[in-house]
Image (cartoon, grey):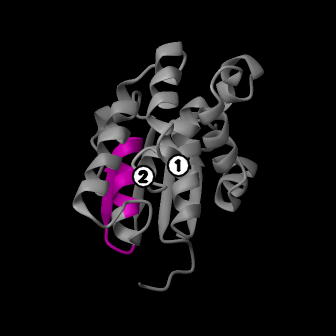
Amino acid sequence: MQRHETPPVDLFARAGADALALRIVLEECRLPYRSWDLDAADAPALPPGFPDALGPTLTAAIVDHDTGVHVFGAHAAMQYLAEKSGRLLPPDPDGKYAALSWLQWFAAADPTVATTLDALEAVLTDRPWLSGAYSVADVAAWAALHGRLESPDALAHRPTLRRWAEGLRHRGAVRRAVAR
C-alpha cells in the first residue's frame, strides 16, 4: 500500500444509512479515510472520474487513492472495500455470493416494512449472520435499520433479530463509525 499524508480513501456521502454503512465497512476493514458530507456547505465537488450527472442523485461514493479507483453507489463501494481489504466477504464462493445476494436484496428492500424485519428474523434463526459469516450484508442491513432497531416495538417479537442487532451494535468498528 502506498503511503499518503492524507488517508488513502475519500468517502463522499449524504447523511444517512449509506454513509453509516460505508463508515462501518471502512472501520471494519481498517482502512484510513476522510469523510465528506455531500450536503455540507463546504463539501468539495466530486473529483474527476465521476459523471457530472451523478451529483444530485448520488448518496455515496469513494475514491481509493492507492489504486485510482472511483466507485459510486454505497453497495458497490462496500463490495469494493471488502474485496480490497480481504475482509467482510467470506472466502468461499458460496459464502461470498450469499453475502452479495443479501447485500443486493437489502438494497431493494424497504427497511420500514415489517415483512423485511420478518424475513431477517427468519433467516437469522439458524445462523449468526445473514450469509453465515459477518459480512457487508450485515453492515448494510444494520445501517439501514439502525434507527428502527432502537424501537422496542420493532424487536418485541423478534428475539433473533434483537440478538443480531445487539451483536453488531457492540462491535468496536460499529461504535467508532456511529460516533463519527
| Magenta segment includes 162 | no
- Residue type indicated by callout 1: Pro
Residue at mark 2 to residue at mark 1: CA–CA distance: 6 Å
> Is-magenta flag for residue 67?
yes
The residue to which callout 2 is attached is 132
Q: Nearer the viewer, residue 118 or 28?
A: 118
Q: Which residue is mark 1?
A: 128
- Residue 172 lies in quadrant: bottom right
What's the residue at 65%, 60% (across, down)? 173
Residue nearest the observer in this picture, 77 or 159 = 159
**Camera sees residue 14:** no
In the picture, residue 151 is in which quadrant?
Answer: top right
Return the x and y of residue 126 as percentages of the image width and height.
Answer: 47, 42
Instruction: Please name the residue shown 34% across and 32% down the image.
Output: 105
The three-letter amino acid code for the residue at tag 2 is Gly
User: How far across and down, in percent of the image, does residue 177 sit?
Assistant: 66, 53
Kindly tell me whether residue 98 is visible in this rendering. Answer: yes
- Quick check: marks 2 and 1 in contact, CB under 8 Å? yes
Element on which disc 2 rests: loop
Q: Which residues are magenta?
A: 66-82
> Vertically, is 41 above or below 7?
above
Query: How many numbered markers are drawn?
Result: 2
In this view, the residue farthest toward the front is 126
Q: Is residue 95 left or right of residue 17?
A: left
Q: Which residue lies at the image location 35% right of the left edge and 25% below the top edge?
A: 108
Residue 153 or residue 88, whichever sits in front = 153
Q: Residue at 32% across / 37% down in the picture?
A: 104
Which residue is nearer to you in this view: 102 or 21? 102
